[in-house]
Structure formats: C-alpha cells, structure tokens
Image (cartoon, rainbow, N blue to C red):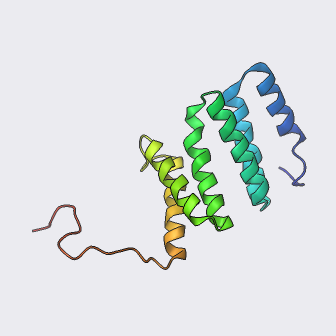
Amino acid sequence: MQLDPSDTALLRSALDAARTTGEHQHAVLTYTALAYCSLLWVLPAQALAHLEDGLAYAREHEVDTMVGYLEAVRAWLLLRQGAEEEATRTARDALARTASPGSTVAGLVARTALAERAVRRGGRRRRRPAGRRGGRRRP
C-alpha cells in the first residue's frame, strides 16, 4: 500500500532494471503502474507523463499488447484536461486498433472516454429517424 504519492522508488528501480535487462514488457507494465499510482493520488499530469513515456517505450520496443490500453487511458486523461478533440481521436484510434473492442479493457476505457465526452456535450448526437436505426426489425 502506497502511503505517500512520492514513494515510487521501488517502481522506478523496477523500471530501471527492466530497461537495463531488456525486459520490455515489464518496463511497459512498470510505466503503467506508475501512471496508475498517479491516478490514485489524483495527479493527472504525472499520470499522463508516465503514460506518454510508456507509450513511446512500447512503440519503440514493439510491445503492442499494451499500446491500446495506454492510449485509451491517455484519451480519458486528455478529456479530463479539456482536450476533447484529441481525446476523441485517441479513443477512436484505440478502438480501431483493438481486435475485440467490446470485450477488452482497452475497449472499455476508450468507450468510457467517448461516452463521457457525449455526456459533457449534452448527448447532442444526431438521431436517425425511426425505421432507419439499423439492426433487425422485430415482427
């Protein structure tokens, strides 16, 4: 249990060890843990910095398994900062890259960011006329 938001020495040590030994997956997971700790302490700027560092590292070392999740959380943080357009683009990109957006954590976080944006805008989504909504018609 972390009792102090600045108590990240163990995580930073783990990050250094992972980077030094070429354990790229563990390094990306450590960036994710640092971001999550910052989120728990309501330090969104720090969380965003850790996410962006983690994304850059993941892309550089081709750790594709975490990119979608990191992008989705980044989209949510961008939305919280008021960068609605960038957040929307990032969330949609994360959904497009997710193989199964309806059943992954990355997809859930990205859809949550998009839903939160829609709520902030007052749900000003264009409605299709009845009969043109798609899906199967019921008898």
Side of 3 relative to 65 (left or right)? right
Question: How many numbered marks, from 0 up?
Answer: 0
| Front one among 39 and 90 | 90
Above-or-below relation of 16 to 45: above
Nearest to the observer: residue 1 or residue 126: 126
x and y, in percent, of residue 76 in the image: 61, 59
Is residue 131 shown above or below 89?
below
Quadrant location of the C terminus? bottom left
Q: Residue at x 50, y 63 (%)?
A: 114
Residue 110 in the image: above or below residue 53 = below
Residue drawn where x is 66% and y is 66% of the image:
80
Farthest-out residue, top: 21
Left or right for 129, reference 6: left
Q: Residue at x 90, y 40 (%)?
A: 9
Residue 8, horizontal then vertical, whole percent: 87, 44
Please provide percent x and percent y for residue 52: 70, 45
Q: Position of residue 117 (x, y in %)?
A: 53, 69
- Residue most toward the front? 85
Is residue 54 shown left or right of residue 69? right
- Give me the residue at 77% from left, 62% from top: 42
Please say if 45 is above or below 35: below
Residue farthest left in this picture: 139
The quadrant in which residue 120 appears is bottom right
